Image: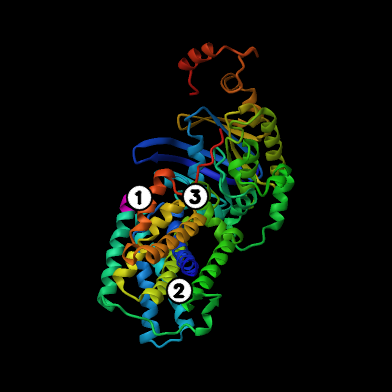
Amino acid sequence: MGEILLQLNNISVVYSDVIQVLKGVSLSVANGHIVSLLGSNGAGKTTTLKAISGLLKPENGEVTDGSIIFNGVNIQNQAPEFITRQGIIQVLEGRQPFKYLTIEENLRVGTATRPGKPYKEDLEMVYSYFPALVKRKKALAGYCSGGELQMLVIGRALMAHPQLLMLDEPSLGLAPLVVQEIFRIIRKINEEHGTTIVLVEQNAHMALQVAHYGYVMENGKIVMEGTARELADNPDVKEFYLGMAASGIAKSYKDVKSYRRRKRWL
Amino acid sequence: MEFFLQLLVNGVCIGLLYGISAMGFVMIFKASSVLNFAHGELLALGAFFFLSLVTWGKIPVAAAFLLTLIGCFVLGVLIEKFFLRPLIGEKLIFVIMLTVGLAAMFKGLILLVWGGNLHTYPEFLPASLEFHLGSIYIAPVYSATLVISVVFLVLFGLFFKKSSQGIFMRSVADNQKAALSLGVHVRRVFALSWAIAAMVACMSGIVLGIINGVNVHDLSAIGLKVFPVVILGGLDSIGGAIIGGIIIGLLETFTGGYLSPSLRDVVPYIVLVFILMVKPYGLFGLVEIERV
């Protein structure tokens, strides 16, 4: 592993002062890597991302314990305006475009961390990654397709020149071919810009293909970690996330469910 | 026919002014979902600032106008910083009640400083501003209103469409969470929308003061006219505010001209009720873009 860019030390997150969602999560992200965060619904993946990007506060959440260090700066419980200016941009789950702004105006909002600076070259850069956006640039985002919107929100985040890009479920609700295209571009961004990427995914198969390293979360804890190769070969991951039995044959849902009740990750 | 055209021109001029003043109201609503009940008092405050600068301070009119606009801009920022910011995250109804309180406070302040009498500005609009189009006479104040309104409209159009800050403001109105995630300074956007709203309210206060005289009760009542205007145009449509303003302005002048001057403040509200029965979201209220 190279130099550590982001380090979470044993963080706990509590919503509305009572609901504890993260129970001591520690993870580290190496500079230039794609790190994938896997886990079922409600495991705490999105909360982990929001703890990093400072977006917990509007939802009444708070990091109550532990520390988050990015580039040597302590960023836990800081305002999103501060954290984004350190170079961390989160792409929210469910795409979240500005519906009543055009594609190009949406992209311009991505320059909010450095207002007044020239942005024309960045627009060109985003359009070169996502040529599909060029001919739609005057269209209102509210009228674009899901695939276009996913490209738009990733492009919008790139406009900010992030050092760390966090993607929350970029494959959600997209056709398999579009998902492949998105993942190809994610890898390309990582290789060409050296952008470090944290990838939260349900689609473990795709995520482990592009990632260098991965963490598996369950019930607000990290239960497993390893290189993408190790995780993809792990029998438990295979069974729960890749849908394969130890023998390599897909099991029926019923079998997996009763099995799960007995054996948790720990 | 001449009378009709005369009323038409006056109505459009006044209506544009209402529209611009309502635009400030709509901006606050779009950015932060707050209904600003102190709008009328802000309008009055602008008129009185200007009055003091011109009559007591003897400052040249153009400079006084600019100073008032700047002063009101700053006032807007301060209102946001000291009164609204502490309430961020509280229930919306508390914030709206706060603006009701602000309205009472400003009104009291104006009564304390300037009293409740009717003041007038000295004559300062040059006679060269009056126009005779055939038999229609346009008084200087109306042509000045028209010029100011169009200038403001163009400036705001450019600001919201072209400038980064304008686009950031629209992004906050559109999807606050996404704007936060991209590092848009949301609190700054709130402050800016209050500043611009206070500025345009004051501007319309000055112009209405020239037309009707400066009296705290009259001006704050006129300020309340933003409600029919914005409800008519659609609460969240800036373009709708302008159109709504023109409609209300025309209704008023035509009622005043053809029916009775005492009805002019009532008829807009009656028409409003009928329009709302047909289009509950206003004429240009945002229809949520929903992809199925």
Q: Which chain is indicated by disc 2?
A: B
Please name the residue shown 53% across and 83% down the image: B128
Residue ranking furthest to the bottom: B58
**Does B243 sit above or below residue A222?**
below
> Is most of the magenta stretch helix, strand or loop?
helix
Distance from label 1 to label 3 (Cα)?
Answer: 24 Å
Give the residue number, with chain letter if any, for mark 3.
Answer: B284
Query: B72 or B78: nearer the eye?
Result: B72
Looking at the image, tell me whether mark 2 or mark 1 is earlier in sequence order. 2
At which x and y percent is residue A19?
37, 36
At which x and y percent is residue A220?
46, 32
Give the residue number, with chain letter if any, for mark 2.
Answer: B69
Query: B239 or B109: nearer the eye?
Result: B239
Nearer to us of marks 3 and 2 is 3
Verify whether residue A111 appears in magenta.
Answer: no
Residue A229's quadrant in the figure?
top right
Query: A184 or A143: nearer the eye?
Result: A143
Q: Alpha-carbon neighbours of circle 3 within 10 Å: few (<14), some, or many (≥20)?
A: many
In the visual, does A49 lie left or right of A170?
Answer: left
SS at circle 1: helix
Please name the residue shown 70% across and 57% down the image: A120
Give the residue number, with chain letter if any, for mark 1.
Answer: B92
Query: Do we see residue A132 in this rendering?
Result: yes
Q: Are marks 1 and 3 on the same chain?
A: yes
Please name the residue shown 47% across and 61% down the image: B246
Looking at the image, tell me whether mark 3 or mark 2 is earlier in sequence order. 2
